[in-house]
Amino acid sequence: MAITFNERTKEFHLFNNEISYIINILKNNQLGNLYFGKKLNERDSFEHFLQTEARALTSCVFEKDGAFSLDIIKQEYPSYGTSDYRNPAYQVKQVNGSSITNFEYKDHSIYKGKNKLQGLPATYVEAEDEGTTLEIHLEDGVINTELVLYYTIFEKYAAIARSARFINKGKEKIQLTTAMSMSLDLPDDDYEMIHLAGAWSRERHVKNRKLETGIQSVYSARGASSANHNPFIALKRPNTDEFKGEVIGFSLVYSGNFLAQVEVDYLATSRVTLGINPSGFTWNLEENEEFQTPEAVMVYSDNGLNKMSQVYHELYRTRLARGYWRDKVRPVLVNNWEATYFDFDEDKILAIAKAAKEIGIEMFVLDDGWFGKRNDDTTSLGDWFVDKRKLPNGITSLAKKIEELDLKFGLWFEPEMVNKISELYENHPDWVISTPNRKDSHGRNQFVLDFSRKEVVDYIYVMMEKILLDAPISYIKWDMNRNITEAFSSALSADKQEEIMHRYILGVYDLYERLTSKFPEVLFESCASGGGRFDPGMLYYAPQAWTSDDTDAVERLKIQYGTSFVYPISSIGSHVSAVPNHQVLRETGIDMRADVAYFGTFGYELDLNKLSDEEKEIVKKQVTFFKENRELIQKGEFYRIVSPFENDGNVTAWAVVSKDKKEAIAAYYKVLNEPNPKRLTLKLTGLESNTKYSVNGSDDYYWGDELMNFGIPVGKLFTGSLDDAHGKIVKDFYSNIFKIKAI
Ligand code: DGJ
């Protein structure tokens, strides 16, 4: 891995064993992009990559040089309004009202390692030789403003992390009205854009569309990354699939409003921009103030989508997630939400916990409803002290009783919210995000606290700290159940009102940082009405996230398949819940529910005392199975094999393979049975061709190449006779798990 700079041709070449990224300083002293893709041999110069043919009707930078137009040249971080008419990477509004700028190359530095981004989540390195960073410093002399572009290339990953920083060194104020984290001009438009779209209860479904001339984008304006769109897109070649072909992923390490956009111009250049959503965003910079954008992570793969995802998984699991729990397998937990909702007392909770212990579960999580006077969702958010009517002995006593059962105890919070019926609201009505003289929109009877204000974050911190200091709490589920409306902070001046959305998220990050530093051994799970803020920013603080409120095994296939495009299996909160399922009323068997939930952090979300004895025995076996295999599941390489978004969506298959390829667990799911179906085989992937494997402890062996090229039969077919209808016969909501072991 290296970053070189050629003094003569003024080219930067960032490369590792897999990728090359080439930037050049253009003759107007701005930055161009020459290449991003598969690794190229280092050579004296890549000058010949600069494509500048004169075109009719372009506006040009230099007199008598019809070929040098910013409209034609592939740029690194394009500006607004000077001969390039596409969407810019940034816009700086000046006191005279103009947004025209000219940031020219000043100098650069290349160093080993990677610096932290102040106040923002970002990937990191643990040893200097894990990454090399390039900082390019540009300057606009008219407004005395510096722009620094950061690039870190990782030694082990086909990934580059980027961000930008603006520093106002002038006397006059400037306003950033756009400040994207990255821009990349690709030379053609022969791509399909993949993104992850959804809604509450069906988050991160995979969408795919061909790029077309014009703009295609996904975004959030909700104050959270959202269930509707994830801060991620990928551009893949039309023939790319899970196993082969080129794809570039773009992922934003951020939890607030974002925009991910591809603009295809008249020359078929595809301009990708990713960063904070410019709509409703303005950031003021007075003299000596600076603004740091969030980080964007670009991943290149010429081995299909699985390879791209595996790079994100490994990078985000080991160099974005942090702390005590990062490398540890996660406890199997039971959460009482769907078991009791708000209707519980200490006895009910202890009864579930006792049953959990007998089954082998390791942690009990008390969900919503333990604080203030909360019997439903109309009151008490913000009053983070125990509801003695339900828990007369307090949280500390309950937590201790649970610990005496030899279980860990976890607790739910929704720190960012307040109900109007609460002591917090009575004392601090102005702490709510709300616009003067305008009606407040409602969402789940709750309002968003103004986390752009430090005193609000301080206050919530103190309340949470007290509970965490008093009780043996090992886990926190940090929920967030509504989006921001009527965005306005009574603490910000008029010109700063469009800073609120970003300031809010910085406040959330600040609270996370303080709590995770003070309580480093507490496992945090982020949540937002399920997966409404499942993004890389959150992963920096909470190594796992509640993936969706939808725990139906069939729906989860799509949700977890889509989530795995970017996010490691160790981050995917997944539980077995009761049937009929509480979100879609479907009845699937307890086997299938577990077979899907294994591919995540695994737990239960039901009243274990309502299980039959037979089911309890099955659940015991499930917990044992997961414990035996969780190291492999959470740290192995995940392969998507059959997509629930393709064909008729009836079949899904995936597998996790250990790094040394000696072990794997593959899963096959078929939603509806069919009469006299086609042969059902599962072709594995990622194994060693010349290794002998056993399947589910069989005495026979199979070569890796057999398992990958011929496959394994996945189930017994029903032949029409009820006498044959025993065992693991294929029927509706069918699943089968295969444990593959090298002999
Ligand atoms: C939404 C979460 O996604 C659920 O798991 C649960 O914690 C509820 N909120 C509680 O209000």
Image (cartoon, rainbow, N blue to C red):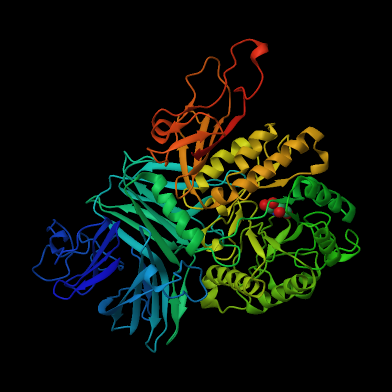
Kindly tell me whether residue 642 is visible in this rendering. Answer: no
Residue 363 drawn above or below residue 706:
below
Residue 454 drawn above or below residue 583:
below
Give the side of residue 531 with respect to residue 700, left or right.
right
Q: How many labels does the image show?
A: 0
Q: Residue furthest bottom?
A: 171
Give the side of residue 19 with respect to residue 490, left or right.
left
Which of these two is toward me, 314 or 22? 314
Q: Which residue lies furthest to the left in this view?
A: 64
Which of these two is toward me, 14 or 684? 684
Q: Quadrant of the N terminus?
A: bottom left
Kindly tell me whether residue 611 is visible in this rendering. Answer: yes
User: Residue at position x 68%, y 75% from top?
Assistant: 456
Q: Residue 153, position in %: x, y? A: 35, 65
Residue 134 drawn above or below residue 723:
below
Give the side of residue 93 with respect to residue 677, left or right.
left
- Specify the quadrant of the image occupied by residue 687: top left
User: Residue at position x 91%, y 60% from top?
Assistant: 389
User: Residue at position x 68%, y 78% from top?
Assistant: 458
Q: Residue 334, position in %: x, y? A: 73, 50
Q: Residue 292, position in %: x, y? A: 44, 74
Residue 502 drawn above or below residue 588:
below
Q: Residue 492, position in %: x, y? A: 58, 78
Which of these two is toward me, 213 or 124? 124
Which of these two is toward me, 654 or 72? 654
User: Residue at position x 47%, y 19% from top?
Assistant: 678
